Image (tube, helix red, strand yellow):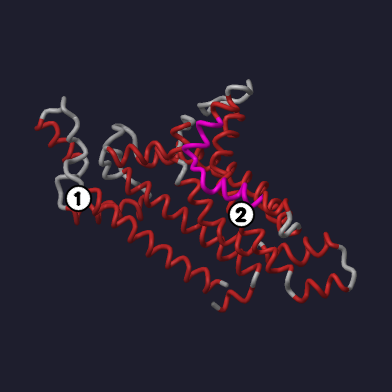
């Protein structure tokens, strides 16, 4: 197991390094510089600011210096678009919001998706099965930027204790989490249904039924665990995608998460904030995939030999 974890960790580190390096290169290929839009800044002041940020050095020196500070000090540098704020400060203040939203969305997805998939598989080719899969397909096809405004108009306007925007009350998480979680719930329902149908057709399930084992025991003890392997495989990237892909939802519901900073970093060519966010998100996705691999090996030990 230790060798397996080390191998996955090294693969993740290599992928994240390549991803961040690509970000460093591409952001500097965009015409202009981080201070090009600062019309009120005199040229000589702009040069002094660039010197303070180390932007007057060669790209190679900037690249090596940035990685050196990250690896030795954990310092991502100062944001060139949000003056006076460090990238570490931005990550510390905004990530808990995005994480809370992502956890809420995943909770909703699992609560809706797994039971729906199990019930659909037990009513295979029935109206419940067809209805559940139609709703799942609708949930996959409708994007978050459509669901969000609809929830604001249909639900928030008619329910007094729900707000259409903001992040002040505990109930403010419900609508954005539901907006993010429904699409994931649709995928989870389809994967659960497919896994359950495959497992329920196995010989050992038929043998258990022939021996008179109760139906709920067969489902909970014998069928559900192997049937959820595809779901577990999907949940790792899905969880990271929910956190990193919540830009639109955070904008619609005015949530102070990392999404707004990511957009700001791209539009303002922030040489330090954007690589820092990409590194942070890359590590997050790598950790999520590593956890999924470990859980899969626990559920199916034969995967350790792969």
Query: Tags 1 and 2 in contact by the CB under 8 Å rule?
Result: no
Q: Which mark is residue 188?
A: 2
Residue drawn at x 65%, y 50% is: 113
Magenta stretch bounds: 132-151
Q: Is residue 223 above or below residue 163?
A: below
Viewer-proximal residue among 151 and 82: 151
Left or right of 82? Residue 182 is right
Q: Quadrant of the C terminus?
A: bottom right
Q: Which mark is residue 82?
A: none
Between circles 1 and 2, the one closer to the viewer is 2
Q: Position of residue 177 (x, y in %)?
A: 57, 39
Q: Position of residue 261 (x, y in %)?
A: 37, 38
Q: Position of residue 58 (x, y in %)?
A: 15, 52
Q: Earlier in the sequence, mark 1 or mark 2?
A: 1
Tally of numbered discs: 2
Q: Position of residue 73 (x, y in %)?
A: 36, 50
Left or right of 118? Residue 41 is left
Residue drawn at x 35%, y 55% is: 71
Viewer-proximal residue among 153 and 174: 153
Q: Residue 138: say if magenta.
A: yes
Give the residue at mark 1: 29
């Amino acid at each position: 197991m230790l060798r397996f974890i080390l191998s996955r960790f090294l693969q993740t580190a290599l992928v994240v390094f390549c991803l961040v390096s690509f970000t460093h290169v591409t952001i500097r290929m965009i015409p202009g510089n981080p201070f090009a839009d600062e019309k009120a800044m005199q040229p000589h002041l702009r040069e002094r600011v660039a010197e303070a940020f180390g932007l007057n050095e060669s790209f190679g020196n900037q690249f090596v210096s940035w990685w050196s500070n990250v690896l030795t000090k954990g310092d991502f540098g100062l944001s060139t678009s949000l003056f006076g704020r460090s990238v570490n400060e931005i990550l510390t203040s905004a990530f808990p919001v995005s994480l809370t939203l992502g956890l809420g969305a995943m909770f909703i997805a699992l609560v809706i998706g797994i039971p729906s998939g199990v019930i659909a598989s037990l009513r295979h080719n029935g109206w419940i099965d067809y209805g559940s899969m139609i709703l799942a397909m609708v949930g996959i096809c409708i994007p978050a930027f459509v669901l969000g405004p609809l929830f604001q108009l249909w639900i928030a306007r008619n329910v007094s204790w729900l707000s259409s925007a903001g992040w002040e009350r505990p109930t403010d998480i419900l609508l954005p989490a539901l907006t993010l979680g429904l699409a994931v719930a649709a995928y989870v329902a389809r994967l659960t249904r497919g896994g359950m149908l495959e497992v329920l057709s196995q010989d050992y399930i038929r043998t258990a039924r022939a021996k008179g084992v109760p139906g709920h025991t067969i489902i909970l003890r014998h069928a559900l665990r192997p049937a959820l392997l595809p779901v577990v495989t999907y949940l790792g990237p899905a969880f990271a995608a929910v956190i990193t892909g919540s830009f639109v939802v955070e904008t619609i519901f005015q949530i102070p998460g990392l999404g707004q900073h990511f957009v700001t970093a791209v539009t303002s060519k922030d040489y330090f904030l954007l690589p820092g966010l990409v590194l942070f998100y890359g590590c997050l996705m790598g950790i999520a995939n590593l956890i999924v691999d470990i859980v899969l090996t626990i559920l199916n030990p034969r995967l350790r030999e792969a």
